[in-house]
Amino acid sequence: MVMILMALDHVRDFYHADALSFSPEDLTRTTTALFFTRWITHFCAPVFMFTAGVSAFFWLRRGRTTGQLASFLWKRGLWLIVLELTVLRFGMFFSLTADPVIVTVLWALGWSMIVLALAVRLPVRVLAAGSIAIIALHNLADPIQASRFGAAAGVWNFLHQPGVFRVGGVSVRIGYPVIPWVAVMASGFCFGHVMTLPVHERRRWLNRIGLGLTLTFLVIRGINIYGDPLRWSATVLSFLRCTKYPPSLDFLLMTLGPAILVLAWLDGVSFAETNPLIVFGRVPLFYFLVHFYLAHVLGAALGRTHSLGAVYVLWIAVVLMLYPLCLWYARLKGRRSYWWLSYL
């Protein structure tokens, strides 16, 4: 589901008339429809990170050792970083030499996997407590500015504050600092234990956790003192406008809580092998890279001058075009002779 929503955001980036003029969350210029078109896609990155951790947990349970999991995670993480700096970079600019070098979600996923490769040896209670602490407390570091670190400012950009720094003669823009994404993935790994419970008990815990996170968001956001660097005023839009870069406590509660409730609702529901949710979910990296190129190519061909309604039409067209390609690739990937395709 989040895979399909993700395509909406990137189609809007490449196709909407106002995509380069202002942010959809700029409350002085946006419309309600445009705001929620962007807002609904906020669920994508947290769910990706969280479920990547859950997937790592189940990968381990298939007869592998912790050492094998650690090896897989750091190799997979390094591969995602390489793809960010090459394939995704070219998809953004149709160039590998454009300035600056922008690093985004694959970068954060990759580094989170590398950190998790080190952390999986910790007792699960320790890892869970540490992950929750980072998610809950990292906004205390919001006042710290990268500029105070001088020549080492890039380290803080890498860790917590989005920004631009130079490496030699190259400008690097960090869009996704690794904190707290590493903790989101690690918490997903710990959450995997919940997913092994008997079905009725599992659903009960999914509902409790999802509802608890959602209510916690409403309370903390309502108090309006801590949890997000952006305070809200008297409107629903300002209440829901939480910070994604880096994801604030409010942002993660707002997205992961309802996502876990949806998971509880879908738990036990059977889908056909050819259902788009199953097909796209089996080839997430392939889908991500192909849909990004497709959205950019169509945006370049059709122009960034179109209405929000046209964005939705093109989004549906992109998803429909991706389905047969992803179905073919999922079947190809399932063949033993093509084991190496697991990296995509």
Image (spheres, rainbow, N blue to C red):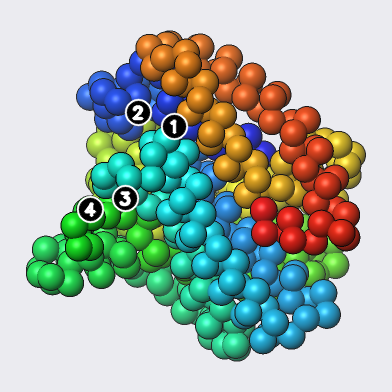
Label 4 Cα neighbours within 10 Å, binned few <14 / some 14-19 / many ≥20: some
Q: Secondary structure at mark 2?
A: loop
Residue 24's mark? 2
Residue 328 screen position, x and y as percent: 81, 38
**Type of residue at label 1?**
Arg
Specify the quadrant that holds the N terminus: top right
Front residue of this view, candidates 3 and 252: 3
The amino acid type, in three-letter code, at marker 3 is Val
As helix, strand or loop, the secondary structure at mark 1 comes to helix
Residue 239 sits in quarter: top left
Secondary structure category for the residue under label 3 = strand
Q: Amino acid at mark 2?
A: Pro
Identify the mark at residue 38; answer none if there is no mark.
Answer: 1
Tag 4: amino acid? Ser
Residue 185, percent from left and from top: 54, 65
For numbered disc 4, what is the local secondary structure? strand
Rounded to the nearest angstrom, the CA distance separating label 1 from label 4 is 27 Å
Find disc 3 in the rendering and name its residue: 101
Residue 297 visible: yes
Q: Position of residue 268 (x, y in %)?
A: 85, 51
